[in-house]
Image (cartoon, rainbow, N blue to C red):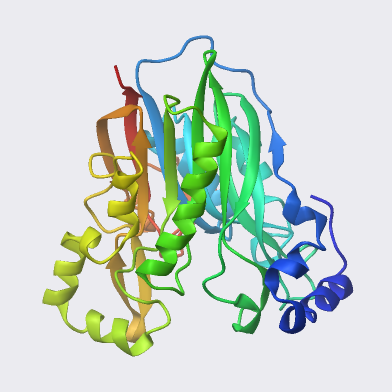
Amino acid sequence: METMSYENRIALGNLVPTLGQFKVMDKIPQYQQCEVHNLVEAPAEVPEVLRHVVFNIERGQTLHETIDFLNMCPDLKNMDIIYANELDDGAVRSGNCNVAYEIAKSIGMNYAYGLEFIELVNPDDNKGFHGNALFSRWPIRWAKVVHMPEQYNWYYDRQKRIGARVAIVCSLDIGGREVGAVSVHLENRADSEGRAAQMAVVYDEIRRSFAPDTPVMIGGDLNTNTFDGNDIPGFTALFNDPERLAKHMAAVEKYERVLPQAEENGFSYREFSSIEGTRRKPMPGGKSMLLKLDWLMARGMECVDHGTISTETKDCTWAEPGSALAKFTGPELSDHNACWADCRFAK
C-alpha cells in the first residue's frame, strides 16, 4: 500500500473528533483497498486434509523468529491457510517493513492484507499501518476488506489510531473448487454484544459473497474475553478469582454471544477450536491471565484433528541451531499461541 506522510496522518487524525472514524477513513484510499499478491504456484494435487492455522502475530515485532517458527515447527508443516491478526506495514516496532509480504515470501504462500489502523504516535513510522492478513498455499481469486461497526474509538486511546476493526474475506481456488476463507479480528475493548454486532456484518458479507453450499472457514482473534475489555476492575477481579476464571474458560459460549451466533449462522466451532487457553494477557506483578480468544469455525467442512502450539520460547525446542529463533532470548514470540485444525470437505 502507498505510504502517507506523518504530517498527513496527523492532519487526518485531527479530523476524527469532528467527523468520526468512518468519515475520516472514507478520505483514505488505503482503507478501500485489499492488498493481494499471488506469489506461488498452486500445489499439483489437493490433499484429502487441509491444515488451517489461526495466529495473532502481535504486529511482527519478532518477525525473523516468527518466520522461523512458521517454517520449522513440526506441527505447522504443510499449512494450507493462515488466518493472521496484527500485522504491521511500515512501523518502527517491526522494522518498518511490510510484515505480511515478508512472511509470505519467506514461507512460500500467497497473501491478502487489509488495513485496520493507522498509528499516530510515532513520527518515525514509514507508514504506521496495522492490519489483518490471510496466507494461502492456494490461489486467491479475490479478497475484500469488511469494516465492522465501531465498538471503541481508538483515537482517544494511548495507542492513538485512525481506523476500526476489519475482516478479510477471500475466495480461494483449491483445485478448481471455490472455498471461502475469512480472517477476523474483533474488538477487545467491548462487551459480548458489541463483538456479536461486529460478527453480524461478517456473516452478511459471507451471504452476499458465497453460494450457500460453498465451504467457508472463519479464523481469528475474536477477543472472547468473557468480560468487557473496558472494565478493568471487573477483569482484575476475575483474574484474582481462579475458580470463577476457570468456569469462564470452560464455558466461553455462556459469556460470549459470538459462539452461539456462529451456530445460528450454520458454522461449527466446537470441534475446530482449541480446548486450551490461547492468549496470555499481561497482568500486574509480571503475571498473566490465560484466555481463550482465538477460534476456527467452519461450514461445509469436517474436523479431523486440531491442536494448540505454544509460542513461548522455552517450548520451541525444535528450533534449528543457529536460527534466529534458536538465538532468541525473549520470553515469547507473541502473546497468543497458534491454533491449527486439519479439515476435509464435508460429504
Residue 327 visible, this angle: no
Q: Position of residue 277 (x, y in %)?
A: 27, 59
Residue placed at 43% from the left, 68% from the top? Answer: 194
Relative horizontal placement of residue 174, taking residue 278 as reference (left or right): right
Relative horizontal placement of residue 10, taking residue 304 as reference (left or right): right
Instruction: Name the foreground residue: 28 vs 50.
Output: 28
Q: Residue furthest top?
A: 44
Residue placed at 24% from the left, 86% from the top? Answer: 237
Instruction: Name the foreground residue: 243 vs 123.
Output: 243
Quarter of the image where one finds residue 120: bottom right
Residue placed at 35% from the left, 62% from the top? Answer: 279
Instruction: Name the foreground residue: 318 vs 252.
Output: 252
Quarter of the image where one finds residue 191: bottom left
Up/down of 123 relative to 83, above or below: below
Number of numbered discs:
0
Q: Position of residue 33 (x, y in %)?
A: 74, 47
Up/down of 327 relative to 210, above or below: below
The C terminus - image quarter: top left
Up/down of 274 relative to 120, above or below: above
Q: Position of residue 29 (x, y in %)?
A: 81, 55
Q: Position of residue 262 (x, y in %)?
A: 34, 47
